[in-house]
């Protein structure tokens, strides 16, 4: 007999590892914890139990942030050999509630950024990641103090100017002190009034942009509460945060945040969330057809064709992300390491031009994985997933009609949340970026 339909079952990119495999991997995890393998002291993340908790906390932002913090203590990091597991987690949460994934994803991304910057111990409390730019807003980073001749005193160099041969010291507590101060405004700061800390990007004295860890509870931080009229992501309004000389800790040098391969990996993690939302719609569609069949309303050929196309789209897109995750891990396994202060990515980029929206375009050097992990691959993944999401939305909404939108809270919320979330994809403009990279030879065909 078939198992009962359960909308929050995990989204599997690959079979779950056996207990024997997990045991065999343990010595490697002990030998190289810096590579992101889970130490034995950390419990294996129970995804199914987490999804049950998410399902019962839909709409409760503090509860969802608490779940994100717990998940962040044992969730995989991109490039650590378990990237598929990370993306499965994000997609699975989105399949329960898109807004919950919108809360979880930046928290986990912040943890990965801090780890890549050599500051994993700072990942305490709840986190956001704010890298957007907007007209009329500008956030700048300046030395916390200066000597009479205008030079920063020793130990307080701004981002991108760390003394040669040194590494950033790990602060005792995240965001409570730093060698720079942030002044100005940052737009599109989701849940800034709820989270404790954030990774933010700011303009530096050298004319570039760099990333900083900042305590959002510090004096000098004020959060606007926007008039959020959207029906999508209603519990996650994104307002402007103002900083007035707020201490912050540099994370790498100028350009490091955008040039590191983790920037592209984070973009693909967002796409995994979009895909999870589409899976939820596919499950709603399948369940509706099954209910109809039990009521002697067998689906017609049109409905069956639509369900078949949904299956084809979701299956192929899940498989694509699984292959991309494997390629990310393979590329990172042989990558040379670099200090964050150098401003260089851990996997060397051949080019890194920063477009207006803050993304980077840059390919990967070397062998058959040339474009893997770079922004070109992120653009492929994000574009492919966005197209899949929009097609699934169209097929499901056309076939189910207005009834579920009017009377099914979970379905209507998923459709509205996903419609807004996937608009982070810039459609034709992102394809134009990808076309420019393809013209440079950044492709595998």
Image (cartoon, rainbow, N blue to C red):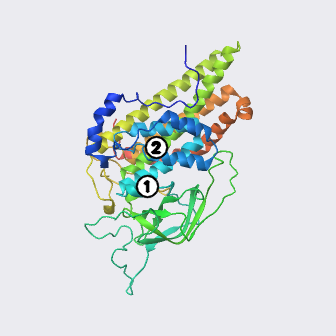
Q: Which residue is mark 1?
A: 123
Q: Which of the two discs, 1 and 2, sits closer to the camera? A: 1
Residue placed most toward the observer, 139 or 301:
139
Exactly how many numbered labels are in the figure?
2
Left of 386 or right of it: where is 159? Answer: left
Left of 134 or right of it: where is 207? Answer: left
Residue 383 visible, this orientation? no
- Check residue 96 in the rendering and tell me which mark sits there, or answer none: none
Q: Residue at the location (40% across, 36% down)?
A: 84
Give the crowd class for mark 2: few <14, some 14-19, many >=20 residues within 10 Å. Answer: many
- Quarter of the image with the N terminus in it: top right
Q: CA distance from mark 1 to mark 2?
A: 19 Å
Residue placed most toward the observer, 234 or 168:
168
Residue 6 visible, this orientation? yes
- Where's residue 340, x and y in %? 33, 59
Left of 154 or right of it: where is 270? Answer: right
Place residue 144 in its image quadrant: bottom left
- Where's residue 121, x and y in %? 39, 56
Q: Which residue, as the protein is rendered here, is positioned at the far bottom? A: 148
Give the crowd class for mark 1: few <14, some 14-19, many >=20 residues within 10 Å. Answer: many
- Where's residue 378, x and y in %? 43, 44
Q: Residue at the location (50% across, 31% down)?
A: 10
Secondary-structure class at tag 2? helix
Q: With respect to residue 190, does 202 lie above or below? A: below
- Where's residue 422, x and y in %? 56, 43
Q: Which residue is mark 2?
A: 269
Q: Residue at the location (66% across, 25% down)?
A: 399
């Amino acid at each position: 007999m078939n198992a009962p339909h359960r909308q929050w079952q995990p989204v599997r990119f690959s079979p779950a590892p056996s207990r024997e495999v997990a045991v065999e991997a343990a010595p490697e995890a002990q030998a190289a914890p810096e590579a992101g393998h889970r130490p034995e002291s950390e419990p294996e993340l129970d995804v199914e139990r987490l999804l049950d908790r998410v399902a019962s906390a839909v709409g409760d932002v503090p509860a969802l942030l608490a779940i994100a913090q717990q998940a962040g203590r044992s969730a995989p990091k991109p490039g650590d050999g378990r990237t598929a597991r990370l993306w499965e987690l994000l997609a699975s949460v989105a399949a329960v509630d898109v807004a919950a994934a919108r809360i979880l994803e930046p928290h986990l991304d912040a943890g990965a950024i801090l780890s890549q910057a050599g500051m994993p111990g700072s990942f305490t409390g709840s986190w956001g990641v704010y890298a957007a730019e907007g007209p009329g807003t500008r956030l700048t980073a300046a030395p916390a103090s200066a000597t009479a001749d205008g030079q920063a005193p020793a130990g307080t160099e701004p981002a991108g100017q760390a003394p040669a041969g040194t590494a950033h010291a790990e602060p005792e507590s995240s965001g409570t002190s730093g060698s720079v101060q942030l002044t100005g405004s940052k737009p599109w700061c989701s849940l800034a009034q709820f989270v404790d800390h954030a990774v933010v990007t700011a303009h530096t004295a050298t004319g570039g942009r760099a990333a900083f860890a900042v305590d959002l509870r510090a004096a000098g931080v004020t959060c606007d509460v926007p008039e959020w009229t959207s029906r999508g992501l209603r519990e996650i309004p994104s307002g402007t945060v103002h900083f007035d000389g707020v201490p912050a800790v540099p994370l790498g040098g100028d350009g490091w945040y955008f040039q590191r391969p983790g920037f592209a990996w984070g973009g693909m993690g967002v796409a995994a969330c979009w895909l999870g939302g589409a899976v939820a719609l596919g499950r709603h569609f399948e369940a509706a057809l099954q209910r109809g069949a039990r009521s002697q309303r067998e689906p017609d050929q049109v409905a069956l064709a639509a369900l078949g196309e949904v299956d084809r789209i979701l299956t192929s897109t899940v498989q694509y992300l699984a292959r991309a995750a494997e390629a990310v891990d393979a590329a990172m396994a042989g990558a040379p390491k670099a200090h964050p202060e150098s401003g260089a990515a851990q996997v060397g980029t051949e080019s890194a031009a920063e477009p207006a929206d803050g993304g980077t375009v840059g390919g990967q050097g070397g062998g058959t994985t040339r474009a893997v992990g770079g922004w070109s691959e992120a653009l492929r993944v994000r574009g492919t997933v966005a197209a899949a999401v929009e097609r699934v939305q169209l097929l499901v909404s056309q076939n189910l009609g207005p009834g579920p939108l009017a009377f099914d809270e979970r379905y209507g919320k998923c459709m509205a949340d996903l419609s807004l979330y996937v608009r982070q994809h810039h459609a034709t403009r992102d394809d134009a970026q990808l076309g420019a990279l393809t013209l440079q030879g950044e492709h595998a065909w």
